[in-house]
Amino acid sequence: MTHVECLVLIPAGPDTVLAYLEDTIESINHHVGVANCKVVVLDDSRQGKYSGIADRFPNAISIKAPEYHEGTQSITRGSLFVKQIYAMKWVLERYRFDIFLRMDTDAIMIGDSPQEDVLAFLKRQPEVGMVGAFTRRGDGSDKTPAMASKGRELTQEARLRLGLKRLALAVTLRRLLRRAEAHGYTRGDMCTGGAYFLSRSAILAMQAQGFFNLKVLERSRLPDDALMALLCCAAGYRLSDLPEERNVLAINWRGLPMPPEVLVSLKKKIVHPIKDDDLTVEPAVRAYFQSRRGAP
């Protein structure tokens, strides 16, 4: 079994711009090192759009996402979550890794070795299984009101009075909630999905408890990051931000957390999102950090 320090999973849907995906991978390779990471692209284009990624990067591979099933409401949310746990099972069969990083295609790495910062933190806090933008956004603002809203959505989905078609989902969520809340979980807790780390021990615990076989979760309307957080806590682990004085992550759900120059001055190492409603923002931000990497 091949060992790498950092295993990176990047889901890529049908609307992903290939050049942007490649730039994100280039940023990872520059700041982590080709020899230190394996990049797995979860190709959810349903067209094999990213099948050639291994020809471009020696440490990258593309795997085809399972087929989307009608009736699961969305190709994101629960459906995307189940595709991600499929990819995680695939990875566990082939690679031994020290830390797992899940990134969106509109996240980039802008500083060296963020995985080492997280590994050092987890060594001091082994009860933590998921690290990212938990209680604070990348711009420093409080995330807890938004999580409380997701918690209400979770409570609604776990109700048993939603009809027979959703009964299996509700029963599964209630079982997971009992376990997670016993470990300090508050409904709606999550690390924002643009980029977060999972410890190897938490992933193995989720797998050992059968959580990666819960295909019924594809019918959930909850975001994939909320479902991953629920499983992590149900497996006995907790979520955390990095300490503020050493927080190398700048992760928002929407909107660049701060100008590129400020990100650099604060020694941030991963930023999300760089995509914006203003279509000129993403190419400009990518070009700025390409220049800092010395990319042609």
Image (cartoon, rainbow, N blue to C red):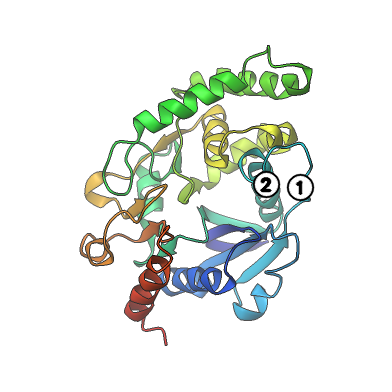
Give the answer, above or below, for where 197 lies relative to 147: below
Question: In the rendered image, which residue does mark 2 sit on?
Answer: 75
Taking the image as drawn, is residue 179 in sight? no
Of residues 258 and 277, the one drawn nearer to the viewer in this rendering: 277
Which residue is farthest top? 161
> What amino acid is labelled 2 in the image?
Ile
Q: Are marks 2 and 1 in contact (CB under 8 Å)?
A: yes
Of residues 151 and 88, the one drawn nearer to the viewer in this rendering: 151
Question: In the rendered image, which residue does mark 1 sit on?
Answer: 68
Give the answer, above or below, for where 141 lies relative to 144: below
Give the answer, above or below, for where 88 lies relative to 57: above
Left/right of residue 169 with respect to residue 140 in the rendered view: right
Of residues 261 and 134, the one drawn nearer to the viewer in this rendering: 261
Q: Secondary structure at mark 2?
A: loop
Which residue is farthest bottom? 296
Q: Quadrant of the N terminus?
A: bottom right
Q: Secondary structure at mark 1?
A: loop
Q: Position of residue 278 (x, y in %)?
A: 40, 62
- Name the residue: 63% across, 15% down: 159
- Name the residue: 73% across, 32% down: 216
What's the distance in space between the residues labelled 2 and 1, CA to CA? 7 Å
Give the answer, above or below, for where 64 lies relative to 240: below
Count of marks overlaid on the render: 2
- Name the residue: 43% across, 74% down: 30
> What amino acid is labelled 1 in the image?
Tyr
